[in-house]
Amino acid sequence: MTTTVHAMIGLEIHVQLDTETKMFCGCPVRYEAAPNSCTCPVCLGHPGTLPVINRRAYELAVRTGMALNCRIATFTKWDRKSYYYPDMPKNYQISQYDLPLASEGWFEVDAAKGPRRVRIRRAHLEEDAGKNIHDVGDRTLVDLNRAGTPLLEIVTEPDFESADEAYQFCMELHRLVTYLGVSEGNMKKGQMRFEPNVNVRIVTEGEEVRTPIAEIKNLNSFRSVRDAIAFEVDRQVETWQQDEGYVIGRAPNENRGWNADRGVTEFQRAKEAAQDYRYFPDPDLVPALLSAAELEALRAELPELPRARGRRWQDEWGVPAEAADTIVADRATADLFEAVVADGAPVELAAKQFTNVWQSLANARETTIAGLGVSAERMSELVRSVNEGAINKTAAQVLAEAMLTRDASPDELADEMGLVQVRDVAATEAWVEDAFAANAQAVADARANPKKAKAAAGFLRGQVMKLSGGKADPKLVGELVNRRLNDVSK
Ligand code: ZN
Ligand code: MN
């Protein structure tokens, strides 16, 4: 008997929008503020207060919906979703129920079998809840600073077939929202939270059964998305193998939590149906209307998206895929890269300097390449200096670092720091001679043992570069070292 198993996975993602103030009041959105210091009668749910829509949150949501190829509603209303927990003192959450702001879109990601279009069911605006803090003695504390923070909830169709595909999607979506400036996307601060819906279709000799759907709540890292889904798929298959009654309709759908320490999902409760939330239109808010002109203006502002941009660099400029991926992740850095190329720097070498030299400097300073603050003209000059052979790659690394604190051009700095490449054959010969004299064993290895020859020659080239203070032309050094190795009389 042959049995095949097909996972069916959908995602719900909550993205915190990058606004100064909350969704329906003027309170600042501050992660580090003292508990309950960013609150007002509106987000505390005092009777008689009235919410006002945050226009920027609305525009950021529309922008994301467009980037996800969704239909954008020109009329959206607001609904109350009953929610009875201390972290939401109004006892309801303002959300969008039957008329979401965006619907029926798609988003392409790289899957194992190639690019794959994932359908987006909907995206709507809502407000976040506060935080219940349970680990203070035997008490629970409530911090309402987060209550009312704007969230965009994005819901996909169950189009993922594996944990890996869902994982790729989350990464790509993260890149999109940070690129668009829609969200800071800081995972540590919980600015992106994931809730996978998982069940499996089990086909045995043409007979098909489906397991109940499990929603895994509140995952806040890409890794937990991948690990939790992979575990859950296996768990459902095993549960069905032990109990054939474990099928959708007969056993309840459930909410589960991910226990990262044990690496398992754990039962929380049977899942609510929509009617349990008692949605109804919020009488305090007017619907949001978007005119055709406003819609067009927002559409015109939408930039070329990171995935398409990286593809274009690969196809038209021959930038290697990995380099394109790295550079395109940050929009300002991608703009800078294009400006460097426009300034006349050869593309391939520019891409190398971005991913090797500048990226490591940026990482060490916990910023982006654009965040380093070096102009496109100066970066381009550094690329051209290496390309023309005026300086070598080792010197480029040193110069780049100096360029962060000094405003001089890379050529001036190279002069001043004695990094202008020495292509003088006699001078280079002398360094080679010294290196051979000081490393007789490596020379002997290189000549006598073919297995060690390559490593020994590399070592000798390194020694020559060192003797030259990094100024020798590596190409010339390579030639001279090889020539000398082949000449056993020296
Ligand atoms: Zn407030
Ligand atoms: Mn939600």
Image: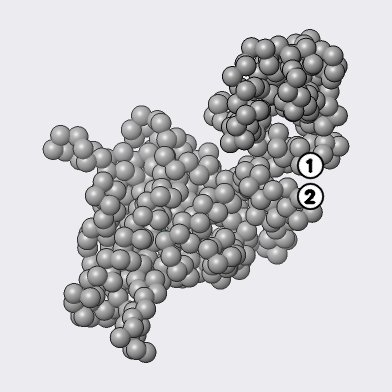
Q: Secondary structure at mark 2?
A: helix
Q: Write the residue at 48% across / 70% down.
A: 159
**Residue labelled with disc 1:** 347
Q: Are marks 2 and 1 in contact (CB under 8 Å)?
A: yes
Callout 1 crowding tier (Cα within 10 Å): few <14, some 14–19, many ≥20? many
What whole-number distance in Å separates the C-alpha atoms at marks 2 and 1?
A: 7 Å
Q: Quadrant of residue 348?
A: top right
Task: Tell me where residue 301 appears, x and y as whole percent.
Answer: 71, 52
Instruction: Looking at the picture, tell me which residue is in the foreground, 153 or 475.
Output: 475
Q: Find residue 159 and name its label.
A: none
Mark 2 or 1 closer to N-term?
2
Q: Residue furthest front?
A: 489
Which quarter shows the N terminus? bottom left
Count of numbered tags: 2
Task: Tell me where residue 152 appears, x and y as whole percent.
Answer: 49, 55
Q: Amino acid at mark 1?
A: Val
Q: Amino acid at mark 2?
A: Trp
**Residue labelled with disc 2:** 317
Task: Tell me where residue 108 appears, x and y as whole percent.
Answer: 59, 63
Q: Residue furthest left?
A: 138
Q: Write the residue at 74% across / 28% down.
A: 486
Instruction: Indicate left or right for 269 with 289 as reference.
Output: left
Residue 337 visible to an observer of this rendering: no
Callout 2 crowding tier (Cα within 10 Å): few <14, some 14–19, many ≥20? few
Instruction: Looking at the picture, tell me which residue is in the foreground, 178 or 78.
Output: 178
Q: Secondary structure at mark 1?
A: helix
Q: Write the residue at 38% across / 45% down.
A: 147
